[in-house]
Image (tube, rainbow, N blue to C red):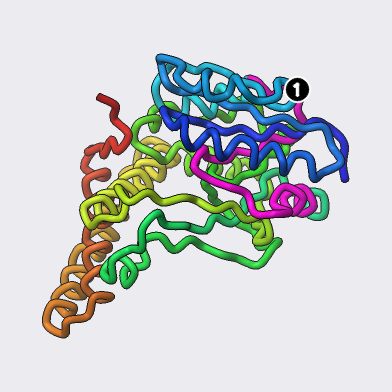
Amino acid sequence: MGDGLVVVAMLTYRRPDDLVKAVPAFVAELGTVERDGRLLVVDNDPDGSAATAVAGFDDEHVRYVHEPRPGIAAGRNAALDQCADAAVLVFVDDDEHPQPGWLAALLDTHERTGAGVVAGAVVSAFDVEPDPWLAAGRFFDRRRLPTGTPVDVAATNNLLLDLAQIPHDVRFDEAFSLTGGSDTMFTATLHRRGVAMVWCDEAVVVDRVPATRLTRPWVLARARRSGNSGVRVALALAPPGPRRWWARAVAVAQGMVRIVGGAARAAVGLVTGSREHDARGRRAMARGRGMVGAAAGSVVAEYTRG
């Protein structure tokens, strides 16, 4: 294995029960590789509620940082700021658990490919069994690719960064803090800067999906937000002027295709009794509405805090 400190950064917001399970699982993975490592818990609760949950863990391997500014982008930037002495930074979520060999697989792929970014696989585990409509819509399916496959965008729920290859001026855009999409913006910017990004399918984390997310309103709202934030990223990356207006026009066209096509598919589902056609049609419609809304300047703030 290579040299240099490995930091696993876990962002958290008022999930003490998840932390109690996730922290020891990721610390255990750090112990499976022959490199110095630590877990960095970034608490994004203004009240610093995670401090109590983290206090009982070994200070040698677990570090707590409080980032009171609201939003996941602020938390991710705080993690970057805390890694001046690290060679590798790996982002994970506080409701995930690593499969055995997760970290070794990420580091091995990084060393073999020399890529600046390595994205790992995320699989869903459900607190309760999804109803047949949700299952038919495959709302929680995640992409899986052969290891070594180049990618041009990735999420931070299982993401390795070679910090020596990350330009210092590339940060998580806090305009996306309460809407989602800052990780898409970040990795898409790295790709445009020429930083190589590859997939590692053996590096698996399991994402726990609570019952509160296993509802039709929640999954359709997530589809709308996803379409909205994706277009907002595309517009932010497009240069001002004609190219940005073109990106806006393309977003409207693509969004309308999803709305019209999704409505037709949902109608087929209604007539035939097909849950798959109904669910996937409604999902396409929701994503399309988010895309058209973003092109018109609307912002879907999924993570707005009361």
Q: Is residue 245 found inside the magenta-colored segment of the image?
A: no
Measuring 25% from the left and 24% from the top, which residue is drawn there? 306
User: Is residue 87 placed above or below 211 in the rendered structure?
Assistant: above
Q: Residues within 10 Å of mark 1 (few under 14, many from 20)?
A: few
Q: Residue at x 78, y 40 (%)?
A: 31
Quadrant in the rendering for residue 71 = top left
- Relative placement, left or right, of 143 versus 178 is right
**Residue receiving disc 1:** 60
Q: In the figure, residue 265 lies in which quadrant?
A: bottom left
Secondary structure category for the residue under label 1: loop
Mark yes or no: residue 139 visible. Answer: yes
Image location (x, y in percent) of residue 186: 53, 38
Camera-side residue: 80 or 67? 67
Front in this rendered view, residue 92 or 3: 92
Image side of residue 125 versus residue 40, left or right: left
Q: Answer whether residue 86 is magenta in the image.
A: yes
Range drawn in magenta: 82-110
Q: Residue 150 at x, y = what percent?
A: 64, 59
- State how many labels appear: 1
**In this rendering, position of residue 220 left or right of residue 2:** left
Question: Residue 151: x, y in percent?
Answer: 60, 56
Q: Residue at x 72, y 41 (%)?
A: 28
Which residue is found at the position 45% from the left and 36% from the top? 182
Is the residue 30 above or below the residue 56 in the image?
below
In what quadrant of the picture does the N terminus appear? top right
Left or right of 112, for residue 241: left
Q: Amino acid at mark 1?
A: Glu
Percent coordinates x, y for residue 203 in the rendering: 67, 55
